[in-house]
Amino acid sequence: MENKDRISNQQIKALLVTTAIGVGVLSLPSDVAMILENDGWIAILLGGLIPIPIILMTNRLLKMYPNKSFFEICKQVMNPIVAYLFFILFFIYTIVVQSYVSRLFAEVIKAYLLETTPMGVIILAMLFSVSYIARSRIEVLARVAVMVYPIILAFPILLLVVNLPDLDYTNIFPLFNINYGEIPNGAVTAYFSYIGYEIVLLAFNISDDKSNSLKYSLRGLYTVIGIYLIIFFVTLSQYGIYQLKREIWPTIAVIKEIDLPGYFVENLDGIMMAVWVMVVYSTLGSFAHMAGIALKEIFRTNTHEVFTLLLVPIIYAISLIPHNLITTYKIMGGFLSYLTLIGTIILPTITFIVAYIKKRRMKT
């Protein structure tokens, strides 16, 4: 490959962080609190550990087949029909993720910023802007991720600092007062807020330093875990467990209550929402790129650019299927949970197992 097709490990780290943190960060504290109450942090921690074996397998897989992408490896080790079935399932997964994220993005923007703007207009505006960056090579996405990355890091730190005077740390207790049988359910619930880490499937093979790609990607994952833990403890300390469980988007609720009288910027909620818009843009951009790459492999074209714009009406139509926010979470979110297990765990695992067995047979 040419040098222009390479990305640094720091870019891979930033790409993982900016893709994984999306709309899930808004409701994650209340989601895990509903299951494990004050010990929701356990779910966040365990949910963040689930991607580690998948990232390890991806790294090993791409080392077994150097300079080949994940999709190229699939075609090489799988029966052609099975490989294309994998591509189709992965494509469906990325499309539903984009539809779900776009709908929740529009719900939040309409509720807090643009109350009179039609939801469809908000969704289309975001999708068209996302399609522009998604048609680029992944190196462009990586450069954007590097720019957004420090802003994302600053967000939880700023959230913690400005809320320190109002936090009631006694709300964190009691700890370990839970039904331990609910821990797996909580971990799986938290795991869905980490989806996006599978961007490493496309990034590892074009790293300019493959020997350290795994280390940097794991650092990115740990960064996401840390951000989620900070947000959980801030919201829990601010509201207490009973109020936290009643909040739909506790992260936004905390942001809306920030007030700094006497400072140059008295209300930070507008700035915080602008940061979140950039985060969602990065998330959608990565998934739109992955969807385009999957279609490129399915239709055997030389580029994915033609598909990114064509996908906009499809994503738009799917995002408007739920009648309200409740059905969005229950129906679309429930369907997405199954697709997530397929797209992020089952497909990479099966590909790795088949590739590993074939490599062992070739050596013998």
Image (cartoon, helix red, strand yellow):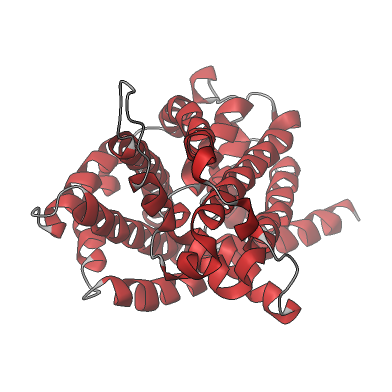
Q: Quadrant of residue 187?
A: bottom right
Q: Quadrant of the N terminus?
A: top right
* Residue in the image at 50% along x and 25% along y: 5
Residue 166 point in image, percent of width and height: 49, 44
Residue 114 placement (x, y as % from top left): 15, 49
Q: Is residue 350 above or below residue 111?
A: below
Residue 128 showing in the rendered view: yes
Side of 104 where 58 appears, left or right: right
* Percent position of residue 330, x then y: 38, 78
Residue 43's quadrant in the figure? bottom right
Q: Looking at the image, which residue is at 61% across and 70% down?
A: 37
Residue located at (71% from left, 56% from top): 49
Query: Quarter of the image holding residue 11?
Result: top right
Query: Along the line of sight, which residue is nearer the eye, 133 or 359?
Result: 133
Q: Is residue 250 left or right of residue 315?
A: right
Up-down: is 123 above or below 322? above
Residue 4 lies, with reference to residue 46, above or below; the image says above
Q: Is residue 341 visible?
A: no
Q: Is residue 36 left or right of residue 310?
A: right
Query: Is 347 in front, or is 298?
Result: 347
Q: Is 53 or 161 nearer to us in this picture? A: 161
Asked whether, in this view, residue 358 is left or right of residue 228, the answer is right
